[in-house]
Image: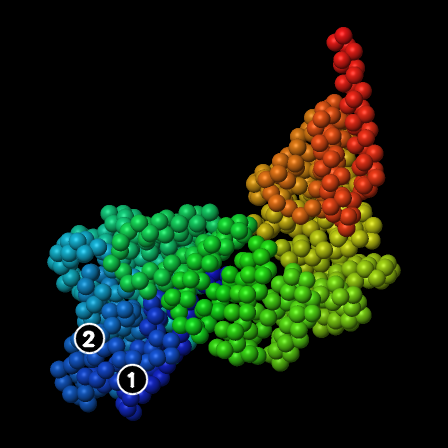
Amino acid sequence: MAPGNVSAKLYSVWKNRRLTAANACKDSVSQVFSASLCRTPVPYLRVSYAGVPFYGRNNAELQPIGTFANDTSSEHLSKHGRVHSLTCNNTHLCMPQTRWTSNRYWHPFTVDVNQLVLNTAIITSGLQSYLFCCSRTLTGITAQTTVEAQSQNCCRMKDSNTHIDETINNVDNRTKAPGEERFPEIVDHGNKQTVQEEALRNFEALLDQMEKSDGAHDHRIGTICLRLAQLCDTGDIDPSRILSYGQRALRAYKSFPLSWEHVTCLHVIGHAYFRMGKFDSAIEHLEESASILNRSKLAVKVKDIDTLSQARESLLGQAKRSLGKFHDALPHFKRSIESAERVLEPGNPELGSAYFQAAQAYKEAKDPEEAICLCIKAVDNHANYYGPKSSQAAEIRKFMSMIYFDLREFENALLEHKVVRPIFESLGRSEDMASSDLIVVESLLELQRYDESIAMLKGIVSSVPETSPFHGNALVMLGKTYAIVKDHQNAMEYCTMALHALEKQQLSIDTGSSLVHLALVYQRQHEIELATTTYKKALSTFNQCSGYQAHTAAADVEGQIGFLLLHSEKVEEALPFLESSVSKKSDIHGADSVELLDVHNHLGVAYSEEGKLDEALKQFEAAKLILSKNATEVDSLMISIYSNLSNMYSVFGRFAEAISCQKVVINLIKRNRDVETLVTLDEAKRTLLDLQKEAETREKAVDNAQK
């Protein structure tokens, strides 16, 4: 599973752990790699001879967590002895999969912990002479949650313990083929046959055996399926496979709807749907998981609940972001951070990642102030952990440049770039350098430092290959820069080069976005035909992509194409694009969203041009209704909507409403003189006088008719 977009806590606890080697004496076990299926936080083990403590590392602190016991001396054990038990001091310990290797006496083998009954976890090795029994409850995989249910379940499951032990032993015996070498070299955790792969095969074989055996209990099948789902979730495995195991586990636990297992199943299923891009289904299952957890008093450690809650809230936030529900996502990210701060140590890099993820959400929700505060926390965390010149810290600083641009703090954006670029340069990451340069160019343009912008953009063009998306973006920005300084010839030359470069790139949302930016440059140059053609290329690109972002972009581009065709007096051609844009935006954003203001206005104008006055009035009134429900900044669009509505009311003879709208136009212009409008204040006043005179004339005519 790629950690970029789906950084669930249950996965991240596992993924950042490193191999540790710690020799208490020269003949001790030399390497231990722990891959926790439950992904609870005791990732490292350090093992000495039997009879002495073994250790677990949580964050930076190494603590004794148990003791090996044996029936022979430590020296004899290292060669021939039998370890008969392992005692845990910490019931929070979780090590379902551990690879132990020795550089002298012991052959490499794998230890599997399988929590198949209430209070006993069995650990078996690849060597038949070793059997470790750990009397504890495995955190996160308890079979019941309330005290009463635990008591009942313990009695019911007691008789099956012997059969389960035998089954696990049989699974481990099958892990070695008859011809397999008995004395291989020390196994490294990077080998092809990883711990995950071995565990997956073992659990699948165990599941197959239990399904075939008579009298197999649903709760045991459910436990194995849940383990398989969690194990698949930690690797790059098809999420449909995770979903299949998760749903089977959920069916097995249908008799325990308020159990921790039921909650965990719903979480795993929600995560699988998230990875499949089915965000609505992901939200449904994750919210159901949260609902059960909130209304049930489960006998689970608070830290485990916080860990699961942090992962769930993060996923819910990401899912709603992916659906464009940016403001709805914010409470989830806030709760995710609160849980992370309770679960993680202050210096844990996962806490910094949680801050950064939330910052991205706040930026999308147009709250740059909160976004920059979170970024500062994130960059401090990553700089302390990875180093101030690390790529992790640099990525956050690059993002901060974008936020400072939104805040119009252009000098601060340049300062961040000055820190970031040398880091990427020292790491040899040319594309990251190009990305950072493109971000800061926007600030340079706002500061009217055009020569610096042009030099930086030409540097990008020469430093990255033509196949790179940054190459095409830099050409687009060069066209824009020359258009700003009114160098039409160079602007058109670079726009042409940009179009050729973008046409060669693979179809993607980024390519479509670059085409949109290029169309805007053509529009700035009053090249309406070229702009329309380029928008249509962008629309074709977005229509071939999937997901919320592509659908939203397609709706926006259709509206822009309709506007340009309307501007070119091609009203009949414009109507289908505008109508489609209204329909799609309503579905995506909701009928009351400000995203529909411009397209309602343009469609109203188009209908009026076609003589469809009733339809035109409906569009203008829809825009007015949106304005009444949303607090928006006054701009030329708002003034145009009220002006058009005033004109349309006058056509229908509804002069009182027309006069009311025209008064709004005058007040808006008076209070916002810096806003550019197509209607001047004097023209608006004259229109109001004309409406009042016409209304008075109509009123007199009605009175005379009545007399």
Please tell me which residue is depicted at 35% across the width and 49% down the height of the picture.
291
Query: Residue 155 at what x, y percent from top left?
Result: 13, 56
The CA distance from mark 2 to mark 1 is: 18 Å
Residue 312's image quarter? bottom left
Q: Quadrant of residue 74?
A: bottom left
At numbered mark 2, what does the secondary structure look like: helix, strand or loop?
strand
Q: Residues within 10 Å of mark 1 (few under 14, many from 20)?
A: many
* Residue drawn where x is 32% and y is 53% of the image: 293
- Describe residue 65's horizontal placement relative to residue 636 as left or right: left
Residue 80 located left or right of residue 239: left
Label disc, if present, on residue 87 of the rendered structure: 2
Q: Residue at x 82, y 29 (%)?
A: 690
Residue 305 appears in view: yes
Task: Indicate left or right for 650 with 192 as reference.
Answer: right
The residue type indicated by label 1 comes to Val
Image quarter where the N terminus lies is: bottom left
- Judge whether residue 543 can be spotted in this image: no
Type of amino acid under label 2: Thr
Specify the quadrant that holds the C terminus.
top right
Q: Height in image: 71 above or below 172?
A: below
Q: Nearer the viewer, residue 540 or 600?
A: 600
Q: Residues within 10 Å of mark 2 (few under 14, many from 20)?
A: some
Q: Does label 2 or label 1 sit earlier along the sequence?
A: 1
Q: Identify the secondary structure beneath mark 1.
A: loop
For this rendering, which residue is in front, 485 or 405? 405
For disc 1, the marked residue is 29
347 left or right, relative to 123:
right
